[in-house]
């Protein structure tokens, strides 16, 4: 049960980061890539992939994906600047 809650929480958080990169960043392909990676955390998607292929991502892979998303969004992707651009566009 806790795994599913954590999966939904991380999947939602990483999907929001990806959407910010898609619509307010200068590299929408990178945002789409992040969105596809974020889908790996959503339990429903995990169950569907396992049902169709028999493959389930191990925990160490999900940890590596999370570290990559956080590192690339905060460090290289300038997430806070993109959030400022997003908030400016709503004013």
Image: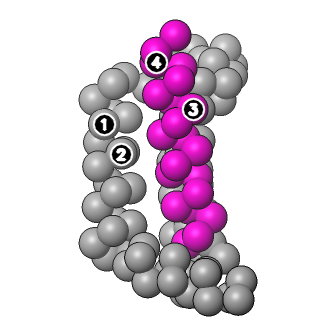
Where residue 53 sits, quadrant-wise, is top right
Mark 2: give few (<14), some (14-19) or many (20+) Cα within 10 Å. Answer: some
**As rendered, which of 59 and 12 lies closer to the eye?**
12
Report whether 84 appears left or right of 91.
left
Residue mark closest to the camera, 3 vs 1: 3
- Mark 4 lies on residue: 3
Residue 69 drawn at (x, y percent): 38, 56
Residue beneath the point at 36% across and 45% down = 66
- Mark 1 lies on residue: 63
**Residue 33 appears in view:** no
- 78 in relation to 14, above or below: below
Mark 4: give few (<14), some (14-19) or many (20+) Cα within 10 Å. Answer: few
- Please tell me which of labels 2 and 4 falls first in the chain: 4
Residue beneath the point at 62% across and 64% down = 19
* Residue 66 circle label: 2
Quick check: marks 1 and 2 in contact, CB under 8 Å?
A: yes
Instruction: Please tell me whether residue 20 belongs to the stretch shown in magenta.
Output: yes
What is the spatial separation of the Cα atoms under label 1 and label 4, in whole angstroms? 13 Å
Q: Secondary structure at mark 1?
A: helix
- The magenta span reads 1-21
Quick check: marks 2 and 4 in contact, CB under 8 Å?
A: no
Residue mark closest to the camera, 2 vs 4: 4
Residue 82 drawn at (x, y percent): 50, 80
What is the spatial separation of the Cα atoms under label 3 and label 2, in whole angstroms? 13 Å
Where residue 44 sits, quadrant-wise, is top right
- Mark 3 lies on residue: 8
Type of secondary structure dominating the magenta stretch: helix
């Amino acid at each position: 049960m806790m795994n599913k809650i954590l999966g939904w929480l991380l999947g939602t958080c990483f999907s929001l980061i990806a959407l910010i990169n898609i619509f307010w960043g200068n590299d929408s392909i990178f945002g789409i890539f992040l969105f596809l990676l974020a889908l790996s955390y959503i339990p429903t998607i995990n169950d569907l992939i396992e049902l169709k292929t028999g493959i389930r991502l191990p925990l160490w892979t999900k940890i590596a994906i999370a570290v990559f998303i956080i590192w690339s969004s905060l460090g290289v992707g300038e997430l806070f600047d993109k959030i400022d651009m997003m908030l400016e566009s709503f004013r």
